[in-house]
Amino acid sequence: MRLLPILFIFFVLPVSAQVYKWTDENGVTHFGSQPPAGQQNEVTIRKSAPGTASVPSSRTIPSEQNQNPDRPPEKVPAAPTLADLERAAAQRACELAKSELASAERMLTLALSIDQSGPMADHRRNQVDLWQRRVRIECLGVE
């Protein structure tokens, strides 16, 4: 029990440390827990979940041939809209369902070549039926 407060202090103190960032004379950026002589830049580390960064709709592309100040900068095409992404996802789901149907049909052909009325052939027929329904559902309005 006496060890618990000591362990708590031992683990809490390093968490409250500051992070310093500096660039040396060669242009190399360094991070450390001690500030360099004459520089006191503190780095704030933000917490964020994966995929939460915002992406601008268009960005300027630096290029060597775009150095003419009279010419406007080239733009990257805008990010796809949600509707575009949904259409692409629906198309991919349709393609995957068709692929699974083709696979199930091949497996049924194999099962029928071994045994026409066995439980494996029945299972394969059920799989073909399932994927035929999935193709109808997933490909509705896509094609």
Image: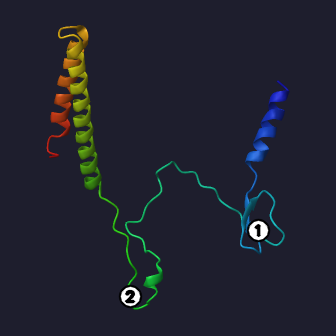
Q: Residue furthest front?
A: 113
Q: How far across and down, in percent of the image, does residue 89 sit?
A: 28, 46
Q: How far across and down, in percent of the image, does residue 94 sit?
A: 22, 40
Residue that numbered label 2 is attached to: 71
Q: How far across and down, in percent of the image, does residue 59 sit?
A: 42, 71
Identify which residue, 59 or 65, lies in the foreground: 65
Where residue 115 sits, quadrant-wise, is top left
Location of residue 95 with respect to 63 vertically, above or below? above
Amino acid at pointer 2: Arg
Say which of marks 2 and 1 sits in front: 2
* Residue at image location 22% in from the left, 8% down from the top: 118
- Residue 126 located left or right of residue 19: left
- Residue 16 located left or right of residue 138: right
Q: Residue furthest bottom?
A: 70
State how the image is colored: rainbow
Amino acid at pointer 1: Gln
- Residue 60 located left or right of residue 1: left
* Mark seen at residue 40: 1
Of the numbered discs 2 and 1, the one sitting upstream in the chain is 1
* Residue at image location 41% in from the left, 65% down from the top: 56
Label 1's element?
loop
Q: Quadrant of the N terminus?
A: top right
Label 2's element?
loop
* Residue at image location 75% in from the left, 73% down from the top: 26
Identify which residue, 12 or 139, lies in the foreground: 139
Where residue 103 sits, quadrant-wise, is top left
Location of residue 53 with respect to 73 vertically, above or below? above
Identify which residue, 132 or 57, lies in the foreground: 132
